[in-house]
Image (cartoon, rainbow, N blue to C red):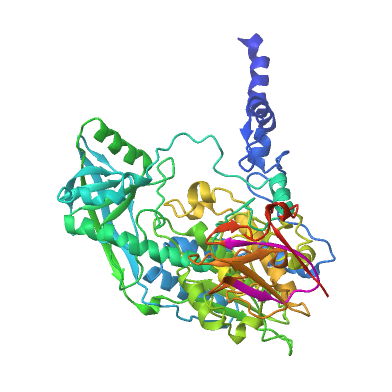
Amino acid sequence: MKNHLPILLLLVLFFCWPGASISLRAQQQSFICPPCNSPCDTIQFHHGGICPTCRMRLKPGELPPKFSPAYPILQKMKTQAYDQSQIMHTISMLSDVYGPRLMGTPNYYNSVLWVQKELKKWGISSVNTPSFDQKHRGWSVQNFSMVMVAPNRMPMQVYPQAYTAGTSGLKKGEVVLLNNLQKIAQWKGKLQGKIVLLGNSYSPVSSQYQPFTRRFTDKQLKQAAQNPDPNHRVIGYLGRRSIVQAIRWSYNRRRQKKEFFDFCKREGVIALVEASDYPYGILHADGNRNIPSYMHTHQISPIASFVMANEHFGRLVRLLKLGYKPQLEVNLQVKFYNNPAYNVNLLANIPGTDAQLKNEKVVIGAHLDSWHAGTGAVDNASGAAVMMEAMRILKKVGVQPKRTIQLALWGGEEQIFAGSRRFTAQTLGDIRTGKLKSDQRKVTAYFNLDNGAGKIRGVYLMGNQRIGQYFQKYLKPFPKSQTLTTQYTDQTDHEFFDALNIPGFQFIQDPLDYISAIHHTNIDTYEYVPESDVKYNALLVAYLVYKIAQQDKMLPRKPFNSPKPSLEGNVTFRLPGFAKAKEVNLVGTFNNWNLFGTPMVKDDKGWYCRLPLSAGRYLYKFFIDGVWTNHPNTPKAQLKKDGKGHGGLTEIIVEK
């Protein structure tokens, strides 16, 4: 034994010495970089090394950015953003204390009061809370449960759907599967005491072979920057519809669904259940599929409705196929709130100081409300907190902006943009008629943050090509955030500003796990907000809006961008026929292919509009009820292409 003692001592030293053991494990193990799914070694993964593939820093997060001495104001802002940061405290308060923040609830309203108090504590005294109430109501869960009791017992993983009614106590019923909601009449007299599975939208999940969390690669961002067509989605979110169409569709959908819910109530259905479309037991609980949210006081309250884990829903479906008759015990207790005082936005100002420009505004905004299954930390406490923190940074470093910098936190974004829709209608203009108010000319830009908690990588230009030069200049200190894409993006509050021809923008953000796991789900919680990303975002926003507030001139606006048809100009465009069309838009090189910015008006000959065009060559076609359409009078052999993905175009030459 004595002869082996030196060897044993060496082995003990080797495995106990930190550097030696880590080195050995690094050689024996490999890990996957969460952002880009590339292999990286143990030391990098655990000690914050930089991934050799995507160049993003791994755990514990990116180091603070470094700035040239040429940007002294940034150094001051950086100290506030990183050394004096309040952002994670803000997110914790909004999500852990006041989450979830469904519109019209005490939680939402109390979060507004807390934000107001916090802003004033930071020295931002110009704060007000204008109402957006349009007979909106709130709703919250008091208690719920769902248990399978036959053929054996199992608690079911579910969450109630917003604005639905309770069950009036514990109820037990047999499960039935309804695959076609259009054929509901054939179930008449057969649903009393039943629990209905909505199989029309059910698709079984399976193992996922892609990482939940990812960052944009340099290649993806380059493709976005080189995209010549603003209507072609390369990254982010884009639906080819106007904000007016989106609102109309949402309300029409609720009216169409009402008949189904009324039928279920008359027939004595206990509850409705739809499957989550997320894997791994994640519950996607919002009103965007079978069970929309009826958020007005005059609307119906559908019978008790739940979203169920896809895997549990699948088990019930398979049991039915095997000939069993599953039974569930269901209990749901809810509370409705009909208090108009809860339905408010929050506006806060850092006043401008220039005698000529102080009445103009640069507005930064995010929605403060959330869905109800999680705490709304990522969507959108993170966005609201970034914008709040940007205001705190600006105030603490003592900037004296020429223009007023305004913070807008919206309520009810998840309920058809209730807050921003009402605000813009009251102060800026009508998105349906195009009639503008005087304040529309005073907003130089609106910046929105609502794509999760990921790092800002650039800006969606919303088809406004002339504005890119300003962002190139002001984002120069942020080399990882300089992607500018002409692409449109939608599904959030900036759309109202863009529709009224105010430069309105959404930031490009790293997707992380926002859509793959977090968006409108029960795991939208504090844990999935990356601290380094939101600190960085607050710093970038603070600097960008300050620089824009200091400009001598307002940012350029898009040409021919209005909900109101243009009937004045030197060039008349006419589309013969199409009498049954509901909406016709003129789209071409003169408006950078804006699908909804140049509407046409109907007369007895078809559709027309007039535009004031300078001398030159222009290409165009029509967008009719969502369909690209060539001019019917242009011979096929004369149709042109623009080399940027557009074909079937008519050419027009405007002489001097």
Q: Residue at position x 64%, y 17% from top?
A: 8
Asked if the magenta segment contains residue 568, the reply would be no
State whether residue 428 is above or below residue 96: below
29 displayed left or right of 522: right
Residue at the far bottom: name it: 355
Asked if the magenta segment contains residue 614, the reply would be yes
Span shown in magenta: 608-623
Question: In which image quadrant can residue 455 be found?
Answer: bottom right
In the foreground, 464 or 645: 645
Residue at the far right: name it: 70
What percent of the width, then of the height, locates residue 128?
51, 82
What percent of the width, then of the height, locates residue 103?
41, 68
Helix, strand or loop for the magenta stretch, by majority: strand
Viewport quadrant of the C terminus: bottom right
What percent of the width, then of the height, locates residue 80?
68, 67
In the foreground, 90 or 166: 166
